[in-house]
């Protein structure tokens, strides 16, 4: 950063100033001094001259108000920015709060303890509370409306400073003896602060200042030091928080009077004085430090005694109270920024994010790309690329190829102009200084420098780029210690141990061109190396320490800016004779400029450069300056006699919305003079001036002017001089044209005056040339308009091309509805299908597929579109239309339409569907998705496999013994699947039997085949047994609870046939219960006998059954009181009678109803009560 004085304000009456404070939000400056002096000033930029922006714009005092009210010397002034209040105090202890009313400041509140003097006052971060400390130890915390919140008297303590933490939870009190005490926000003592900076310090000292940056603009790094404490002896410590055990320690080497952070906590200003060695009087200094203690600049301030300093809200100015004057200095920050390929890259911090926000702003298209980067160190640019130097993220694992050193701590990220990372390099060398050329990146610490020959493959695929990034061949990465003497014979290796070897003369700056690397050392030595093979060519000695260096375009001259802002030049190749008569290489040039903070060589002329001095830009040719230009912009680029600069100060006031107004282009004098000569004098005279001051840009300017006047000979000569081959060809083409008007039209098109050129073509009745011009420009809307407005018939091919091009225009902007209209007219079916798909207009897509001829190459693409949205039927039609049945089957499988897949496979004699089905089913079963597998088999008409799985589920559910109704349903579903399987077999056999064979014959054949197929598994024989068992089980209990005990017992008797399905203990327990209720104690006795003989019972359970049987049969004789009808029928019958599934009774009548599905019977008189079969629940027909 550089410092430039630009304004000095004298206080009337030579009254000495004691304090100064700059309001960060509104820009008011309050200064207090002796004899009750209190003034409020405001510096405002004049906006009369629109072109001058930023620091270059003139400033004036828009407010200069003296506030009356204090009688003693004003010692403390502090602002409350949130509520626009000013609080001041004098040596008599009088406190006044001032408020702004109608553009002037007035007293709002007054307070005077009349006991002691106020030593310090501080508002908290949100402006709600103020803490006031008195010299006698009294502390008062009040609210913004003047109410006292709490007070405390720290007896025996002399207070001199106070500071709030950023969260307003901690208060720091600075004591007169140099101690700092930590209190909470209620006034409770916590602890004394450990002051590491005062270790081994002797003699008296006092606190010069405490400033705790509140983080309102974010932090430059995570866990960044923000609490600065400085003592009058020059010792300073910067802490991350109040208990930081490892603070940053600084010895400023001067007597300190005041300190303050800038607006974003990135720079600490320390003001004080130093005893001059040669003079009696003291020298006033302001030193600037980073939060990590790195010294940035020293600013010398005139005057006898400096008493205070304060930063402006944007951090671009600093106000200094010296004697009876206020000095204002411009601060030129070292922004993290760069310029590549019409893109300004800049970084800033945000309070809501811990990272740097890096913006890639394309100034040509006014588009910006944002990238968040942790621990950003610097931004370096060259050509179309930039390097972001950062600290490595410890939480992210590094890939093996990225570093050969374990735990690399820094990263160099190569990015393009939109912020896309192309190649990261992890290194173990701190990149304090980074420079880059079109082929190399050089990063240097204080002891060593690292060289990386980067490659960017513009036409390679992402995979190939990755392969390039993984290679470390051919010495593309090398490290050299600054004390090494490389020969250039590829002797550099990637040895990070060199980076930790010390040196007595550290590196302080580097720069490079395509052929040369320059490394500057703190002693003033400059070392020159060759590139790309690094060899030490020469050492030079300067009389200054370089801070910033730059090589001209042919590497013959070096520009050096030192720490004080002095610009000097060194000629690297000139041979001169020194005082001893020896010939030496290199000469310091006589040109020297002060207060320089930026410079840039021209890319195309080794003698041209531009530099920024204070708020002026100077252009030098052969070390001779042109007249200065008033600006405060940072120079982006100097090429073609034009300078592009960017007003970074203005951009960073609102970094999220950069404005193109802040990019300024300047033409240097020779370009301005040549343009004026051509306009005023003429081409011939101007050509002589350009001959004397040759430059390709000037020749191009002359060529363009000659073209305008159709002076083809001069134009051709000028194009030859500026080596513009396209221009020469254009002039040749113009020479072949006969018509003057045709030449003028071509020239108008060459200069971009397309409307004028088109009008000329049309006036010549050359509509074809007008259309050709618009086609070259890609203005297809105008092409279509010209084609339609023409007198003759338009070319159909050209019309189609225009419609398709306009369709592409809308499709690129995702305006699919507009695109469809033009693609229809352009008969572009491929793009039309894409638009329908993007619009989700599947009916339109289906209509398009139907309109296409068979085997059209577009049909597979449309079919795949249907597959992606789950439209199986349409996809199948499309695939079959292009004769791709295999893809049709695959689509059905993909969409789980297995029945369709099987049908297609059978129709097209495809054998692999069975294996595919089995594979998918096993996949589902592995994932325990049995129901999905059942549904799969069912849809694919594999009913027997589905039934087996369903029986398995029913059996598992039955074992749980919880919900018999659910178990019955599962067994019914299983049996229904078996019935479907029976029907499928019969139908298949019926289809096989040909000729006039009877239905009975085919049915018999079907049964025989079924018998063969099911020989391994007899599920098909007894498909309904499980359903019957649970049906009767549930029916018996329902009848029992409804009081039909005899019917319940008869139903329960049927359960004896189902011991393989329902546990016997449950069957005979239910039978015993029903028989007992029916007083059929004989049947009950048999049931108990069966229960007691069951081996599955435990001894305890068996004993319980025996006890219960004893209790029952001691009261009742185990004999039937009446003979059951059922027993009689069973004894006298020749065979087993059918059972009614509605009542559980045997059917003795000859007429009964039989279900078409499950083939079970219901008594004729009972079926009228049912709409559905009691067992399988199918409709009663």
Image: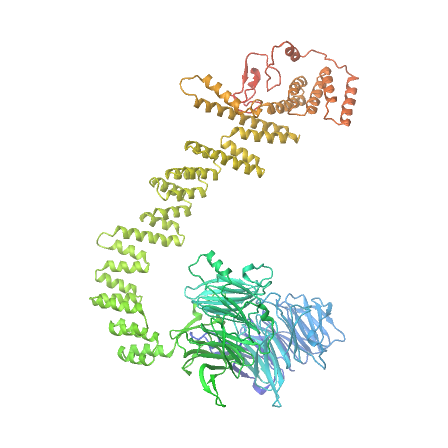
Please, which colouring scheme is shown?
rainbow
x and y percentages locating residue 217 in the rendered image: 57, 67
**Residue at the image position 22 percent from the left and 66 percent from the top:** 736
Observer able to see residue 575: yes
x and y percentages locating residue 262 in the rendered image: 58, 73
Observer able to see residue 652: no
Observer-nearest of 1120 and 97:
1120
Count of residue discs: 0
Reply above or below: 883 against 155: above
Reply above or below: 979 against 72: above
Reply above or below: 558 against 217: below
x and y percentages locating residue 1014 in the rendered image: 54, 24
Q: Residue furthest left?
A: 738
Reply above or below: 582 against 637: below
x and y percentages locating residue 51 in the rendered image: 42, 74
Observer-nearest of 916 and 40:
916
> Which of the 4 image quadrants contains residue 882?
top left
Q: Residue furthest top?
A: 1132
């Amino acid at each position: 950063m550089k410092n430039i004085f630009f304004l000095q304000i004298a206080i009337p009456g030579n009254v000495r100033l004691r304090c100064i404070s700059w309001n960060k939000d509104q820009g008011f400056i309050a200064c207090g001094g002796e004899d009750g002096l209190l003034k409020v000033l405001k510096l405002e930029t004049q906006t009369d001259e629109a072109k001058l922006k930023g620091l270059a714009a003139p400033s004036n005092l828009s407010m200069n108000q003296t506030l009356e009210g204090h009688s003693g010397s004003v010692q403390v002034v502090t602002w409350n920015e949130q509520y626009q209040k000013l609080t001041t105090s004098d040596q008599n202890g009088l406190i006044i709060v001032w408020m702004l009313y109608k553009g002037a400041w007035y007293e709002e509140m007054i307070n005077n303890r009349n006991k002691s003097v106020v030593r310090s006052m501080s508002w908290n971060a949100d402006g709600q509370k103020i803490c006031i400390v008195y010299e006698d130890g009294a502390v008062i915390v009040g609210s913004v409306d003047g109410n006292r919140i709490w007070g405390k008297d720290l007896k025996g303590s002399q207070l001199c400073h106070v500071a709030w933490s950023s969260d307003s939870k901690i208060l720091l009190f600075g004591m007169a003896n140099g101690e700092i005490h930590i209190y909470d926000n209620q006034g409770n003592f916590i602890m004394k602060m450990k002051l590491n900076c005062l270790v081994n310090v002797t003699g008296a000292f006092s606190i010069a200042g405490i400033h705790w940056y509140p983080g309102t603009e974010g932090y430059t790094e995570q866990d960044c030091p923000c609490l600065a404490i400085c003592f009058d002896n020059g010792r300073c410590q910067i802490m991350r928080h109040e208990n930081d055990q490892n603070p940053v320690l600084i010895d400023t080497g001067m007597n300190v009077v005041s300190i303050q952070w800038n607006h974003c906590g990135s720079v600490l200003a320390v003001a004080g004085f130093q005893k001059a060695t040669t003079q009696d009087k003291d020298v006033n200094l302001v030193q600037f430090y980073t939060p990590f203690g790195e010294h940035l600049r020293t600013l010398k301030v005139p005057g006898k005694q400096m008493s205070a300093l304060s930063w402006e809200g944007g951090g671009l100015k600093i106000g200094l109270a010296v004697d009876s004057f206020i000095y204002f200095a411009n601060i030129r920050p070292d922004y993290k920024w760069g310029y590549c390929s019409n893109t300004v890259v800049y970084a800033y911090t945000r309070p809501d994010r811990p990272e740097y926000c890096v913006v890639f702003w394309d100034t040509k298209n006014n588009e910006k790309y944002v990238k968040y980067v942790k621990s950003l160190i610097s931004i370096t640019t060259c050509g179309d690329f930039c390097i972001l130097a950062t600290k490595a993220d410890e939480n992210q694992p590094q890939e093996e190829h990225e570093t050969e050193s374990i735990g690399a701590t820094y990263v160099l990220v190569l990015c393009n102009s939109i912020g896309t990372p192309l190649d990261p390099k992890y290194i173990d060398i701190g990149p304090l200084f980074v420079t880059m050329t079109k082929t190399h990146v050089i990063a240097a610490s204080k002891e060593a420098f690292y060289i990386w020959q980067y490659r960017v493959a513009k036409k390679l695929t992402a995979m190939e780029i990755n392969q390039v990034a993984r290679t470390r061949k051919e010495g593309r990465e090398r490290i050299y210690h600054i004390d090494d003497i490389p020969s250039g014979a590829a002797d550099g290796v990637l040895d990070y141990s060199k980076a930790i070897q010390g040196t007595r003369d550290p590196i302080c700056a580097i720069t490079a061109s395509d052929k040369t690397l320059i490394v500057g050392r703190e002693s003033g030595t400059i070392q020159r190396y060759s590139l790309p093979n690094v060899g030490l060519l020469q050492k030079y000695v300067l009389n200054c320490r370089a801070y910033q260096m730059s090589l001209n375009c042919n590497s013959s001259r070096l520009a050096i800016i030192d720490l004080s802002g002095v610009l000097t030049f060194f000629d690297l190749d000139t041979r001169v004779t020194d005082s001893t008569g020896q010939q030496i290489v290199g000469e310091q040039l006589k040109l020297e400029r002060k207060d320089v903070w930026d410079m840039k060589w021209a890319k195309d002329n080794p003698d041209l450069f531009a530099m920024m001095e204070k708020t002026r830009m100077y252009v030098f040719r052969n070390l001779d300056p042109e007249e200065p230009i008033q600006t405060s912009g940072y120079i982006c680029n100097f090429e073609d006699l034009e300078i592009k600069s960017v007003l970074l100060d203005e951009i960073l006031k609102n970094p999220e919305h950069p404005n193109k107004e802040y990019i300024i282009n300047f033409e240097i004098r020779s370009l301005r003079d040549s343009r004026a000569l051509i306009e005023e004098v003429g081409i011939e005279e101007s050509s002589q001036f350009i001959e004397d001051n040759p430059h390709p840009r000037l020749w191009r300017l002359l060529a363009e002017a000659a073209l305008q006047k159709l002076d083809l000979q001069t134009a051709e000569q000028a194009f030859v001089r500026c080596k513009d081959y396209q221009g020469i060809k254009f002039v040749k083409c113009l020479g072949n044209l006969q018509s003057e008007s045709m030449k003028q039209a071509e020239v108008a098109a060459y200069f971009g005056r397309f409307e004028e050129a088109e009008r000329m073509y049309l006036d010549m009745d050359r509509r074809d040339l007008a259309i050709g011009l618009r086609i070259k420009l890609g203005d297809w809307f105008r092409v279509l308009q010209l084609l339609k407005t023409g007198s003759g018939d338009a070319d159909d091919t050209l019309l189609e091309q225009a419609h398709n091009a306009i369709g592409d225009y809308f499709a690129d902007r995702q305006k699919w509805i507009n695109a469809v209209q033009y693609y229809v007219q352009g008969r572009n079916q491929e793009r039309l299908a894409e638009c329908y798909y993007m619009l989700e207009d599947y009916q339109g897509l289906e209509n398009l597929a139907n309109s296409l001829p068979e085997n059209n190459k577009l049909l597979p693409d449309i079919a795949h579109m249907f597959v992606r949205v789950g439209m199986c039927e349409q996809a199948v039609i499309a695939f079959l239309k292009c004769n791709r049945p295999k893809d049709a089957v695959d689509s059905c499988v993909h969409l789980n339409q297995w029945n369709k897949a099987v049908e297609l496979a059978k129709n097209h004699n495809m054998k692999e569907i069975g294996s595919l089905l089995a594979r998918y089913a096993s996949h589902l079963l592995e994932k325990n998705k049995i129901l999905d597998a059942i549904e799969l088999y069912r849809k694919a008409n594999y009913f027997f496999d589905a039934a087996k799985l369903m029986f398995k589920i029913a059996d598992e559910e039955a074992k749980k013994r919880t919900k018999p109704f659910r178990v019955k349903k599962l067994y019914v579903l299983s049996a229904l699947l078996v019935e479907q399987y029976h029907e499928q077999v019969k139908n298949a056999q019926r289809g096989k039997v040909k000729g006039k064979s009877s239905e009975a014959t085919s049915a018999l054949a079907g049964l025989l085949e079924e018998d063969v197929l099911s020989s391994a598994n007899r599920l098909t024989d007894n498909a309904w047994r499980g359903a019957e068992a649970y049906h009767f089980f549930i029916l018996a209990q329902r009848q029992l609870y409804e009081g039909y005990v005899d019917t319940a017992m008869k139903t329960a008797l049927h359960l004896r046939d189902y011991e393989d399905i329902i546990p016997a203990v449950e069957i005979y327990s239910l039978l015993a219960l029903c028989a007992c209720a029916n007083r059929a104690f004989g049947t009950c006795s048999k049931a108990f006998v069966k229960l007691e003989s069951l081996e599955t019972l435990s001894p305890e359970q068996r004993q319980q059954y025996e006890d219960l049987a004893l209790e029952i049969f001691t009261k009742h004789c185990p004999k039937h009181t009446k003979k059951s009808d059922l027993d009689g029928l069973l004894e006298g019958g020749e065979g087993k009678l059918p059972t009614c599934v509605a009542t559980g009774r045997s059917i003795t009548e000859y007429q009964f109803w039989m279900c078409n599905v499950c083939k079970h019977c219901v008594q004729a008189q009972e079926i009228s009560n049912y709409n559905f079969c009691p067992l399988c629940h199918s409709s009663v027909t």
